[in-house]
Amino acid sequence: MSSERVPVELSKGVNGLEKVILRDVRGSSAEVYLYGGHVTSWKNDHGEELLFVSSKAIFKPPKAIRGGIPICFPQFSNLGSLEQHGFARNKFWSIDTDPPPLSTSSSSKVHIDLILRPSDEDMKIWLNSYEFRLRIALGPGGDLTLTSRIRNTNTDGRPFSFTFAYHTYFSVSDISEVRVEGLETHDYLDNLQNRERFTEQGDAITFESEVDKIYLSTPTKIAILDHEKKRTFVIRKVGLPDAVVWNPWDKKAKAMADFGDDEYKHMLCVEAAAIEKPITLKPGEEWRGIQELSAVPSSYCSGQLDPQKVLQGS
């Protein structure tokens, strides 16, 4: 069936879990598991995988899938009383056959709409009623856009608050050859130092040990330069002021059962997020958070990204 280049195909993935495959006519593709509303693959028109998924990832509910783009909702990390990163990444989502219109250009792109609503069991864990609509869209240039719309559907007048992240795992050639630009001079909370607040001093972020930081009030564009692959990932974000940068490095990698001992060398998480100031919705109110990912060739000999071209350009 894949030879017919069907734009949107429902298929069986690992362990029989249902997934949706999106294909653009130029050859790029994405795969989304209904379990977790979880993007597990994003390939360019050369068929190169742009996301990292661990070879040891466990595709077995209720375990979250290690890699791709897990969705952290309604809680990032352990910043609250819920399980780590909340429950959205551990739930089965449904295909949304009649989503309310989105006033963006994504309607013209190959896309799938998913929806998550709480079950009675969920309501015991987090005492709120909500609708979480997620659109995953693949653009003609191979860009991948995730649009989350979260609405408070409580009927008793109660507002609710949440934190959120697209916990994106990027595939990189060698973590020691990667730099992140766009976060310099910004404040961050260092999760390795009890979330103490510091200011980023470097021209760019490079990696030679474990990193786990929440950058605050960040720009709408962040770039990840992979020198070896001569590729730059550009993250554009709306409604997501913060950005998490994470690499577990060797010791933590060895401690994770669903992560290969040396896989930290080939991945980097840069996560569009809303963490420092939780989002609060009154009944009937809706929040929107958008992440657009693109991968562009880069040949920056000096390792310097031209900020005019990527961070301030179109």
Image (cartoon, grey):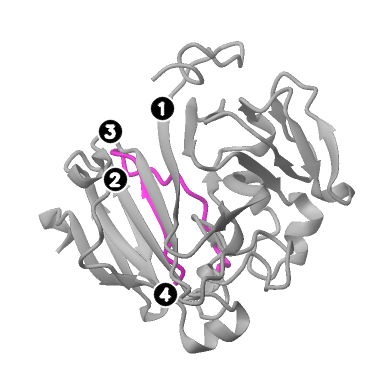
Dot 3 corresponds to which residue?
Answer: 141
Three-letter amino acid code at disc 3?
Gly
The label shown at residue 14 is none
- Disc 2 versus disc 3: distance between alpha carbons? 8 Å
SS at badge 2: strand
State which region is magenta.
Answer: 35-57
- Rendered image quadrant of residue 305: top right
- Amino acid carrying mark 2 in the image: Leu
Three-letter amino acid code of the residue under disc 1: Val
**Residue at the spot of label 2:** 138
Q: Foreground mark, 4 or 1? A: 4
Q: Nearer the viewer, residue 33 or 284?
A: 284
Residue under numbered circle 1: 296
Question: CA gap, disc 4 to disc 1?
Answer: 36 Å
Badge 4: residue crowd in 10 Å (few <14, some 14–19, many ≥20): some
Instruction: Give the distance between the C-alpha atoms of the residues marked 2 and 1, in whole angstroms.
Output: 15 Å
Residue 192 at what x, y percent from top left?
85, 49
> Magenta: predominant secondary structure element?
loop
Question: Of marks 3 and 4, which one's residue comes earlier in the chain?
Answer: 4
Q: Which residue is mark 4?
A: 117
Q: Is residue 288 left or right of residue 177?
A: left
Q: Earlier in the sequence, mark 3 or mark 1?
A: 3
- Which percent across, then down, holds residue 132? 42, 64
